[in-house]
Image (tube, grey):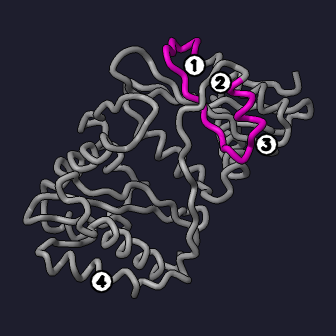
Amino acid sequence: MNLSINLIENDQDYRDGIAIRNIDLDFTPITVEDARNHDATMASDLVLHRLLGRDSEGKPRAMGYVREDRIPDGKLFMIEALMADWRALDEWCEMADAVEAHALQLGATTVIGSTRSNRQATVDAYIARGYALSQRNPLSFLDVQRFDASSFMPSVEKARADGFILMSVTDYVASNSEWQRPFWRLIMDLAEDIPMPVPFVEEPFDEFKKWMDSPVWKSDTRFVALDGEELIGISEYDIRSADPTIAATYLTGVRREYRRKGLATALKTLAISDAKSKDV
């Protein structure tokens, strides 16, 4: 074995683990504070564990996630091995083995492993372990400062001409003191249509509310569409506090009965234009 792997249980291990994560996912860095705030939004009945792997000199080399998620029956765990150098396949395999074993120890009946398809050796290693490739999720990147909204503004103008209301969630919150439950309902309804390897299970409102109440959740980087008082669509992004020139996009979607009207394009146009104004 090349790595000494242990469950992250102290502050230094936690910081070292997040540092590994930011090396591997350098296109979307996070701060230690952001990570802790995100951890605090986890549902109280679900598990999130991290494992840290150090080499013989004590240098951090790998960090693994074991995150529980909901399925209709049984226990589902998502696992991932993040690396200081993903080309060290033997170290990746050690961490992948460790997070899988930890998930099984926690009672997993289903395990979903994540990696990136441009790291074919890790895809092959998963398949060699008996995993089946079930879904590919594309990563796309945009130079926001070169984005020209003029080609897409007609969709915004049309949506408003058709009687739909487009606004930031900051404005929506200001206009509706009971905003959280309809916002949760919109996200759950849209999430049901997101392709996933396992059936969708709705997150309870009280658990979702932890995220809306968290410091990591921002209302001014989210834009919604309304038909009268009903929320019908959203486009959202978050600026990375570790590097404010980088933003990560999240859900963009519209209720089924309102699709093919240009609303998603309109909302995405507002979101990207807003990010551009904030120097992303």
User: Mark 2, residues whose alpha carbon is within 10 Å: few (<14), some, or many (≥20)?
Assistant: many
Q: Badge 4, how many Cα within 10 Å: few under 14, some, many 20+?
A: some
Q: Tell me where residue 182 appears, x and y as whole percent.
A: 17, 50
User: Mark 2 highlights which residue?
Assistant: 99
Crowding at mark 3 (Cα within 10 Å: few <14, some 14-19, many 20+): some
Which of the pair 225/23 is nearer the observer?
Answer: 225
Q: How many marks?
A: 4
- Residue linked to disc 4: 154
Contact (CB < 8 A) between labels 2 and 3?
A: no
Mark sitting on residue 86: 3
Q: Nearer the viewer, mark 2 or mark 3?
A: 3
Per the rendered image, the range of residues in magenta is 104-127
In three-dimensional space, the C-alpha distance between marks 2 and 1, rounded to whole angstroms, equals 6 Å
Of discs 4 and 2, which sits in the foreground? 4
Of helix, strand and loop, which one carries label 2?
Answer: helix
Earlier sequence position, callout 1 versus callout 3: 3
Q: Any mark on residue 103, and which?
A: 1
